[in-house]
Image (tube, helix red, strand yellow):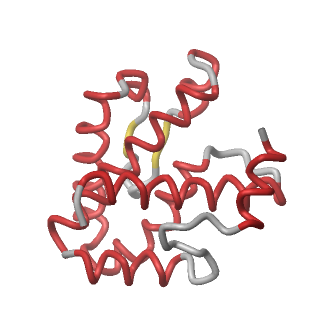
Amino acid sequence: MNLPESRHLAQRLLIYEAVAGKDSEPTESAAFRVCAKLRRPLITLAGVAGFRSLLSRALTLARADAPNLAVVQVAADGSLRGLDELEPQIDKEQARDGGAILIAQLIGLLLTFIGEGLTLRLVQDVWPEAALDSRVSEKEREKLEHSR
């Protein structure tokens, strides 16, 4: 899996979370929900300190392409903080782009450290009902279009 494919996978996860979030009116961005869902299995795999290091590195790399992520921080428990400060400063599209970059960096690091097979298995375990292949399902596409 190369960089464009990791970005594509990140986009798929964000689309899935955006669509799923429309049903429950979430208070967090799709990127924060993706990170939160990956946190538990990755803490099991690498421990809290390992996950925090991985997410901190992904955030640092993402800030190079999305400087607006400067207010976002990784908390001691591995969760992301700073969304409340980020949203008033930028528009929704910039927030989505920054989130996509962050998730793509996180997936890229996972691919580097644990490999493609384990990364894809982990993602499929977290989102078993998501169609994570290269096609967007008609249902997802329809929900996404209605959410815009």
Q: Is residue 45 left or right of residue 27?
A: left
1 lies above or below 106: below
Q: Nearer the viewer, residue 34 or 16?
A: 16
Above or below: residue 83 compared with residue 130: above
Above or below 20: residue 132: below
- Camera-side residue of 141 and 53: 141
119 in relation to 63, above or below: below
Lateral position of residue 103 relative to residue 93, left or right = left
- Specify the quadrant that holds the N terminus: bottom left
Residue 58 at x, y percent in the picture: 28, 47
The residue closer to the viewer here, 30 or 97, is: 97
Residue depicted at 61% across the width and 55% down the height: 15
Residue at x 31% of width, y 28% of height: 65
Q: Residue furthest top?
A: 89
| Quadrant containing the C terminus in the rendered view | top right
Residue at 31% across / 52% down in the picture? 4
Looking at the image, which residue is at 43% across and 61% down? 9
How many numbered discs, if any?
A: 0
Residue 79, image x and y in percent?
A: 45, 53
- Residue 14 drawn at (x, y percent): 56, 54
